[in-house]
Amino acid sequence: MFEGVFPAIITPFKNDPKQTVDLDGLRSNIQYLLSQGVHGIVPCGSTGESATLSFTEHEKVIEVAIDTVNGRVPVLAGTGSNNTAEAIVLTKAAKDLGADGALVISPYYNKPNRSGLIKHYTRLADLDIPVVMYNVPGRTGQNLEPDLVAELAGHPNIVGIKEASGNLGQISRVIEETRGKEFMVTSGDDNLTLPIIALGGAGVISVAANVVPKEMVEMCGAAAAGDLDRARQQHYFLSPLFRALFIDTNPIPVKKAVELAGMAAGPVRLPLDDLDAAKTAQLSSVLSRYVGKTTAVTPKRKGAAKGGAKKGPRR
């Protein structure tokens, strides 16, 4: 269900004092991605600034994504937290809204022990929604080891893992340990997508696909079909963009790239801050190789979303 290219979509905000979620812009961005052949949509991940969305906003973004997709591709909703009770609330909400699955980041800051990790993921999977674990030690401060992943893969509702450890040896081991199970490993790093697919991975949950969705689909399609020459060509064509999108903390650069490409973006929310002028120029120069329109655009859209209840810190 979750194979191929799944853009981890940005959450566009308006340039008003409350930085209201731009729901019209969100719909427009998703429609564009669908027109380019992506295989699924991931709202409310790290790239979607989930940590600064209220509960109401979080649910509304997922609802709009599901409504806009309208069954054409799966929606894998970000519902993770370092608070198991909060993750349960978010995951139940995503399930009730009709999400096809939940992307659940490994709990950050707490550094839970092994039994705590098992109970955390098991309780979410017991909600009877497909769960894709998310291993990103750079944000969580803790690695999901291959033997732990293999153990959790035995749960019928834990269907995969987004791997962003950057350790190809570990990723290969996870694929090896889960062979024969209904479990997929997908890349969490655009620049490692090709080698991960070559190892048997299922695709990518992608930052770059926000701005080059068609090219990401072409690269992954070639790799999955065994056309490694074509896949390598596309990988090296896209590599400068992969690097440019991480010249600052994600999603700061990709949100600016989406804006430069003429789509709905708006500012990032504090404690993140907008890309500075020098890095914007650097990003724009790289982006011009891929996207024709690279003049900064502030989308002017009507309507405003109502604010929701505030959530406590989640990352």
Image (cartoon, helix red, strand yellow):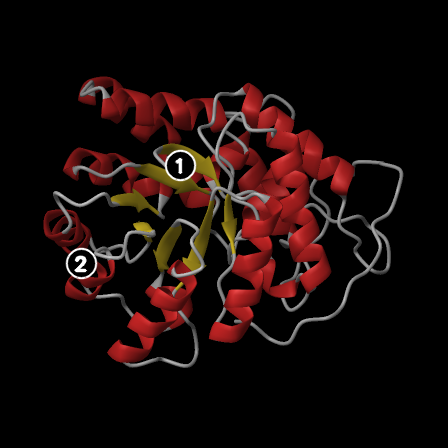
Residue 110 in sight from this viewpoint: yes
Left or right placement of residue 195 versus residue 79 in this view: left
Q: Is residue 54 shown above or below 83? A: above
Give the number of marks: 2
Rendering quarter of residue 223 = top left
Q: Which residue is mark 2?
A: 150
Left or right placement of residue 244 versus residue 224 in this view: right
Q: Is residue 82 shown above or below 45? A: below
Q: At x 84% / y 55%, what residue is drawn?
A: 306
Quarter occupied by the N terminus: top left
Q: At x 55% / y 28%, what residue is drawn?
A: 71
Q: Camera-side residue: 56 or 296?
A: 56
Q: At x 65% / y 50%, what residue is drawn?
A: 277
- Callout 2, which amino acid? Ala
Q: Camera-side residue: 228 or 146?
A: 146
Left or right placement of residue 122 versus residue 7 in this view: left
Instruction: For label 2, count other residues whose C-alpha is less than 10 Å away and answer few (under 14), some (14-19) or many (20+).
Output: some
Can you give x and y, in whole percent of width and height, for residue 63 in the image? Answer: 66, 44
| Front tag of 2 and 1 | 2
Q: Are marks 2 and 1 in contact (CB under 8 Å)?
A: no
Q: Which residue is mark 1?
A: 240
- Work out whether mark 2 precedes mark 1 in sequence or the reverse, and give the earlier one: 2
Can you give x and y, in whole percent of width and height, for residue 250 in the image? Answer: 51, 54
Instruction: For label 1, count other residues whose C-alpha is less than 10 Å away and answer few (under 14), some (14-19) or many (20+).
Output: some
- Callout 1, which amino acid? Pro
Can you give x and y, in whole percent of width and height, for residue 109 in the image? Answer: 43, 78
Numbered badge on residue 101: none
For the residues labelled 2 and 1, the Cα–Cα distance comes to 34 Å
Can you give x and y, in whole percent of width and height, for residue 165 in the image? Answer: 29, 58
Q: At x 56% / y 48%, what residue is drawn?
A: 253
Helix, strand or loop at mark 2: helix
Helix, strand or loop at mark 1: helix
